[in-house]
Amino acid sequence: MKKCNVMVVEDNEADRFVISRKLSSVMPESRLIHSGSLGEAYAAYMKNEVDLVLLDLNLPDGYGPQTVTEVRRFNKSVPIIVVTGAETDNIVYESLRMGANNVVLKSQIEMPDFVNVLEQNIR
């Protein structure tokens, strides 16, 4: 898989670890940029080139699909993959409507389909 800078916006340490471990195994050449909030994500984005964002929807300073809109404010074109524990059709629909490129359930991170989603979204 292509080398790129991946921003992981996730406030839960355990979830961030699982996501990062999976990314490191399938994208070993890539650089991971970690943020625990939208504010941290914005600050990190201003200092780094970002090729892909993995975004949790429930953050200390953002909740629900609206977090996608907040990330879109500082980059209109970066691919955003929402990574959520909420298994409802409404969350998926609203996240896509707000500008996410894909939605992946946290329970699917270890599944082969997650790698396919990554490959589809790397510029």
Image: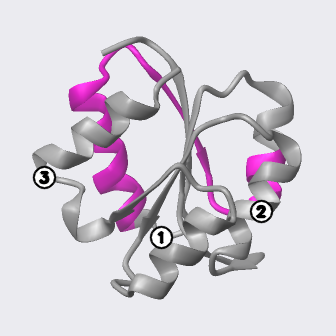
Q: Amino acid at mark 2?
A: Thr
- Left or right? Give the position of 53 relative to 50: left
Number of labels in the image equals 3
Quadrant in the picture for residue 14: bottom left
Task: Quadrant for residue 13, please give it.
Answer: bottom left
In front: label 2 or label 1: 2
Marking on residue 12: 1
In reply to whether residue 105 is colored magenta, the answer given is no
Whole-Å distance between the Cαs marked 2 and 1?
A: 21 Å
Q: Which mark is residue 78?
A: none
Report the disc number at residue 111: 3
Q: Which element is circle 2 on?
A: helix
Q: Earlier in the sequence, mark 1 or mark 3?
A: 1
Instruction: Check the image and report above or below for 6 versus 114.
Output: above
Q: Position of residue 51 (x, y in %)?
A: 60, 26
Viewer-nearest residue: 103 or 40: 103
Q: Nearer the viewer, residue 85 or 46?
A: 85
Percent x, y of residue 18: 28, 55
* Residue 29 painted magenta: yes
Q: Amino acid at mark 3?
A: Met
Q: Classify 10 Å Cα crowding around label 1: few (below 14), some (14-19), many (20 and above).
A: few
Side (left or right) of 117 relative to 57: left
Q: Which residues fall within the magenta stretch?
A: 14-42
Kind of residue at badge 1 = Asn
Residue 78 lies, in percent from the top left, at: 67, 35
